[in-house]
Amino acid sequence: MNKTVIDAHDLVRIYDEKTVPVYALNGVHLHIERGEFTAIKGPSGSGKTTLLNMIGGLDIPTKGYVEINGTNITKLKGNKLIDFRLHNIGFVFQSYNLIPVLTAKENIEFIMLLQKSPAAEREKRINELLNQVGLKDKAKKRPSELSGGQQQRVAVARALAPKPQFILADEPTANLDSVSAGNLLDIMAKLNREENMTFIFSTHDQRVIDRARRVITLEDGKIVADTAPSVIVHDVI
């Protein structure tokens, strides 16, 4: 199995090009291997969320490209891109983004339904995930009946349900108290350790940064520091 999961090359994202150009990303090169537990940090406006959106196919670069397992997702359009994301990328957002009328179990199942997974496979996977995130007894609860930490654990389980290539987590602990944040990070670290699941975080949270095995620092849309010595930082001229 190929160790390289994400290969982003010379990513540039410019907003307001017709007026005053704003470089959200300015020549970012990034290589992520399977099993990494990586935090991307930087001040507000440094480009963290834009980079995650590029990797996740939620935004299109002005220049450069992103390859996931050798597929250039920058060239995928419409339903092909949607289908690729559905089968390869898991998303966890700080706002949880759970469907309020669905139970915890149904929220986790949702992506698998879109994938048209068989019922028996869905049932087995959901039960496994509810156990892993410690919510077996909350399966029939709707989001409004769960705490913030519990809702975020449902969101993690939902992201993991289709067995994606990696998880993108954008400020996943931002709305959580310290105990809930610690529990969530413990769960994700355990999944990374035991299942070799790849996690990439965008975060301001020092607790996430302290647990990461690789920390990438962005400033003004550029990578200015990377704890992985094999990664070369490229300057844009």
Image: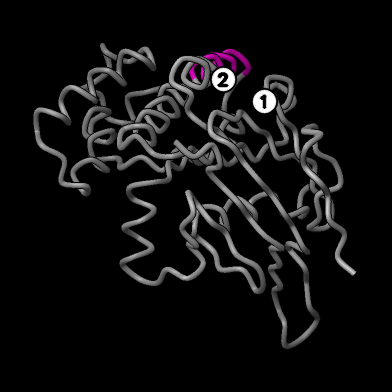
Image height of 74 relative to 71, above or below: below
Report the quarter where the N terminus lies.
top left
Q: Which residues are magenta?
A: 178-187
* Residue 180 shown in magenta: yes
Classify mark 2: residues with Cα within 10 Å, few (<14), some (14-19) or many (20+): some
Please, which residue is most extreme toward the right here? 237
Cβ atoms at labels 1 and 2 below 8 Å apart? yes
Classify mark 1: residues with Cα within 10 Å, few (<14), some (14-19) or many (20+): many
Residue drawn 78% across the image and 64% down it: 26
User: Helix or strand or loop: what does disc 2 sit on?
Assistant: helix
Q: How far apart are the alpha carbons under marks 1 and 2?
A: 7 Å
User: Which mark identifies residue 208?
Assistant: 1
Q: Is residue 229 left or right of residue 110?
A: right
Q: Amino acid at mark 2?
A: Leu
Image height of 18 relative to 175, above or below: below
Residue drawn 81% across the image and 46% down it: 232
